[in-house]
């Protein structure tokens, strides 16, 4: 639940540029016209892997009136229907999603699942969220995709090297970064204990 809630928080933050607007406002700049975000209602959320956390994210996204599509080779059509997820292949997810969130373990198959080829297939203006594992996204290629305007922004809780003291994405105006907070709530720590 904690990671799913963090994912939704990151999704809303990247949709509305909340951290950037917060920083600007604290500086006394009052740049109201600079921070024009997007609504999430009626947008398509693409979930890569619809297991425990992915299905919780789907449930919460549907509560925000988002359309949810999912890529998961282990997800049955019946289970997808019961979760309210339209099951698609990865290429379709990339081309249709307004937001993409990753919820897959890091394996040889999923390493850099979002890479230069993937970013060529995404819808222009897509926003990427990763609260799963570092290494799922080629960070150099993500920066290129953001700089080119193909990707509108990213909200990342995990990085290829952690603890992340330096990263090619740090300081980018279109990137929100948190220090692997997916399980950092009082409730989650009590459950772990």
Image: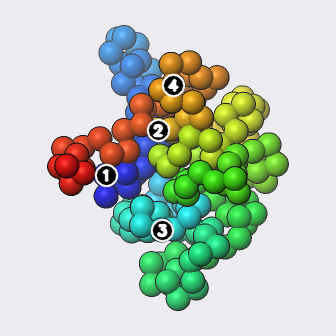
Secondary-structure class at tag 2: loop
Residue 52 appearing in the image:
yes
Q: Secondary structure at mark 4?
A: loop
The residue indicated by pointer 4 is 164
Residue of label 1: 2
Left or right: residue 19 versus residue 136 is left
Can you give x and y, in whole percent of width and height, for residue 147 in the image? 72, 29
State the image quarter where residue 184 is shown: top left
Left or right of 189? Residue 40 is: right
Q: CA distance from mark 4 to mark 2?
A: 10 Å
Q: Are marks 3 and 4 in contact (CB under 8 Å)?
A: no
N-term-proximal mark, 3 vs 4 = 3
Q: Which residue is tagged 3?
A: 51
The residue located at (82%, 48%) in the rendering is: 117
Asked if 190 appears above or below 164 in the picture, the reply is below
- The numbered dot on residue 157 is 2
Label 1 sits on a secondary structure element that is helix
């Amino acid at each position: 639940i904690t990671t799913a809630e963090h994912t939704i928080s990151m999704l809303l933050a990247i949709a509305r540029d909340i951290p950037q607007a917060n920083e600007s406002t604290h500086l006394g700049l009052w740049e109201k016209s600079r921070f024009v975000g997007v609504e999430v209602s009626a947008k398509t959320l693409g979930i890569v892997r619809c297991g425990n956390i992915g299905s919780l994210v789907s449930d919460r996204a549907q509560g925000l009136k988002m359309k949810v599509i999912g890529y998961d080779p282990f997800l049955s059509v019946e289970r997808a229907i019961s979760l309210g997820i339209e099951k698609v292949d990865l290429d379709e997810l990339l081309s249709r999603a307004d937001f993409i969130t990753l919820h897959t373990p890091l394996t040889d198959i999923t390493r850099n699942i979002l890479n230069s080829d993937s970013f060529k297939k995404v819808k222009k203006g897509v926003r990427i969220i990763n609260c799963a594992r570092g290494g799922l996204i080629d960070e150099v290629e993500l920066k290129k995709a953001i700089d080119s305007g193909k990707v509108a922004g990213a909200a990342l809780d995990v990085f290829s090297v952690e603890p992340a003291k330096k990263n090619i994405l740090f300081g980018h105006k279109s990137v929100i970064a948190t220090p692997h907070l997916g399980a950092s709530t009082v409730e989650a720590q009590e459950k772990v204990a």
